[in-house]
């Protein structure tokens, strides 16, 4: 692994930051949707798909940052 200061590293960090921000936004949306009493199964299914997608992205970010943090 490099020092993490090159163009590709900075671009990866920017993308990771966007993914983490989107995950936070999605969590807020999920909380609001789940607080509703009248949620359809289609809405829950769509939410579950987006949450799984977001979790996959966040896991990738965590693994990438963890790998760079190791000596």
Image: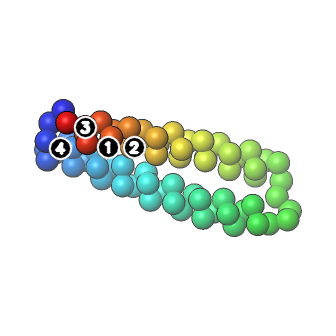
Q: Position of residue 69 (x, y in %)?
A: 25, 42
Sequence-first tag of 4 and 3 = 4
Q: In the rendered image, which quarter contains the C terminus? A: top left
Q: CA distance from mark 1 to mark 4?
A: 10 Å
Q: In the rendered image, which quarter contains the N terminus? A: top left
Report which quarter residue 28 is drawn in.
Answer: bottom right
Q: Is residue 44 above or below residue 39?
A: above
Callout 2 touching callout 3 (CB < 8 Å): no
Q: CA distance from mark 4 to mark 3?
A: 12 Å
Q: Position of residue 13 (x, y in %)?
A: 28, 49
Q: Position of residue 19 (x, y in %)?
A: 43, 51
Residue appearing at x 63%, y 63% in the figure: 29
Q: Which residue is mark 4?
A: 4
- Secondary element under disc 3, as helix, strand or loop, is loop
Q: Position of residue 61 (x, y in %)?
A: 39, 43
Q: Which residue is mark 2?
A: 62
Residue appearing at x 36%, y 55% in the figure: 17
Q: Which residue is mark 3?
A: 70
Sequence-first tag of 1 and 3 = 1
Residue appearing at x 74%, y 45% in the figure: 45
Q: Which residue is mark 1?
A: 65
Sequence-first tag of 2 and 4 = 4
């Amino acid at each position: 692994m490099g020092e993490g200061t090159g163009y590709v590293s900075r671009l990866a960090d920017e993308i990771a930051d966007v993914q983490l921000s989107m995950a936070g936004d999605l969590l807020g949306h999920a909380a609001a949707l789940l607080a509703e009493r009248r949620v359809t199964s289609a809405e829950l299914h769509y939410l579950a798909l987006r949450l799984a997608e977001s979790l996959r992205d966040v896991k990738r970010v965590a693994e990438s940052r963890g790998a760079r943090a190791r000596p």
